[in-house]
Image (cartoon, rainbow, N blue to C red):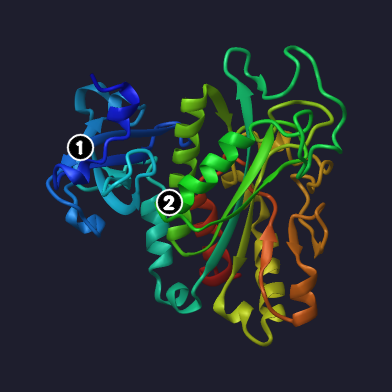
């Protein structure tokens, strides 16, 4: 008799042309990810080859019970690292049966911004640094911490090795390889300042791809932590006190910023971001006020400032960018639980489309 693992690891392509498509979407909280699978008659190479589907929105906080049907529109496909073969993960966004985007569909507005001719011409690049915390399942306390207690002060844990300093590396490495397999442009990983906290980076990604890839990378990570029996937290300040919070620093450049004279373009873009600071903060994640205190490598939430190589600034410009007179900048304000569709679209809109009065 076949063992469970034999069935899980079975290569379907040896036996059938049919594939499994896992439809993935963002749920009603704006951070919960949902998914369900369906059989497709043959391998596909584009989301346009996939059918729309539906789900019960009343069970995800996205529709009333008396009119609960929400329609999934396939938008991007990735190889499925869990099922392998020709099976795929499908990033979807959500609409009413009449074709209107539901309120929690943040991708629709982002796609409009990224398809604007002025934005297309500038080839917006993003690199998002996603920080997260791994928690012990039954106690919701960081991995590697004594239950109900605290480890030694921060310092030895950042980019560290060793059983007393690095906790959860098997999960992190599994996620890294799974993202590469899926076709996500994951560019690196590292252990973070607080023990039990890690980071991965996605990018450079162009336009709407940044949001699609980040959401699927989050989905893959939560599936892996599910297998490992560990809880994944994107809380921007999971442990109060003298511990680093968790952010999603967003690196950004346009074609004009990457060309000669780009540093002046960067400074003008930063000036615009400063003028809309409150609007950006309001859209940059829940609970961010607990993180942006002016300590632990952050600027105060009510203060906008930028600087070269300054990790206590709202916007950081790298030394290389200053030296070369072109490049990119880093928006350090987004929280770890931000919506990448919202943040990337808002940065783009402010720097390229918004007109100052």
- Depth check, front residue: 334 or 187: 187
- Depth check, front residue: 255 or 159: 159
- Work out which residue is located at the far bottom of the displayed protein and give it: 260
Instruction: Indicate which disc residue 181 carries.
Output: 2
Q: Which one is earlier in the sequence, the residue at label 2 or at label 1?
A: 1
Residue 155 appears in view: yes
**Residue 323 in the image: x percent, y percent?**
80, 79
Of badges 2 and 1, the one in the foreground is 2
How many residues crowd mark 2 within 10 Å: few (<14), some (14–19), many (20+)? some
Q: Is residue 288 above or below residue 232?
A: below
Secondary structure at numbered mark 1: strand
* Residue hosting label 1: 38
Q: Which residue is drawn at 64% across and 44% down?
A: 199
Instruction: Indicate which disc residue 189 carries.
Output: none
Instruction: Report if the CB atoms under discs 2 and 1 are less than 8 Å apart.
Output: no
**Residue 110 in the image: x percent, y percent?**
42, 57
Horizontally, residue 261 falls left or right of residue 344, namely right
Secondary structure at numbered mark 2: helix
Quadrant containing the N terminus in the rendered view: top left
Q: Residue at x 54, y 47 (%)?
A: 176
Residue 63 appears in view: no
Horizontally, residue 136 falls left or right of residue 117, namely right
Gap in angstroms between the C-alphas marked 2 and 1: 21 Å
**Residue 353 in the image: x percent, y percent?**
51, 70
How many residues crowd mark 1 within 10 Å: few (<14), some (14–19), many (20+)? few
């Amino acid at each position: 008799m076949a063992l469970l693992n034999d069935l899980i690891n079975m290569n379907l392509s040896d036996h059938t042309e049919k594939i499994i498509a896992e439809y993935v979407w963002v749920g009603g909280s704006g951070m919960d990810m949902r998914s369900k699978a369906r059989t497709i008659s043959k391998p596909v190479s584009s989301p346009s080859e996939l059918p729309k589907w539906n789900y019960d929105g009343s069970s995800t906080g996205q529709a009333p019970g008396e009119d609960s049907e929400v329609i999934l529109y396939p938008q991007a496909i990735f190889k499925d690292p869990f099922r392998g073969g020709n099976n795929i993960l499908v990033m979807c966004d959500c609409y009413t049966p009449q074709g209107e985007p539901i309120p929690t569909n943040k991708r629709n507005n982002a796609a409009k911004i990224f398809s604007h001719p002025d934005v297309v011409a500038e080839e917006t690049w993003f690199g998002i640094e996603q920080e997260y915390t791994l928690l012990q399942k039954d106690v919701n306390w960081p991995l590697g911490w004594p239950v109900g207690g605290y480890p030694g002060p921060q310092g030895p844990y950042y980019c560290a090795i060793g059983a007393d300093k690095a906790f959860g590396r098997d999960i992190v490495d599994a996620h890294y390889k799974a993202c590469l397999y899926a076709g996500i442009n994951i560019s690196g990983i590292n252990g973070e300042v607080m023990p039990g906290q890690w980071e991965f980076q996605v990018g450079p990604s162009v336009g709407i791809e940044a949001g699609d890839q980040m959401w699927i990378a989050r989905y893959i990570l939560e599936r892996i932590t599910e297998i490992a029996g560990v809880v994944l937290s994107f809380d921007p300040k999971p442990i109060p006190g003298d511990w680093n919070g968790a952010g999603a620093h967003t690196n950004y450049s346009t074609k004009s910023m990457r060309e000669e004279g780009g540093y002046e373009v960067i400074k003008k873009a930063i000036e615009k971001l400063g003028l809309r600071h409150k609007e950006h903060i309001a859209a940059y994640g829940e609970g961010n006020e607990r993180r942006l205190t002016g300590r632990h490598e952050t600027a105060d939430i009510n203060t906008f400032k930028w600087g070269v190589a300054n990790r206590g600034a709202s916007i950081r410009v790298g030394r290389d960018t200053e030296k070369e007179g072109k490049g990119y900048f880093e928006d350090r304000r987004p929280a770890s639980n931000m919506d990448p569709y919202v943040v990337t679209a808002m940065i783009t809109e402010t720097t390229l489309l918004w007109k100052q009065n």
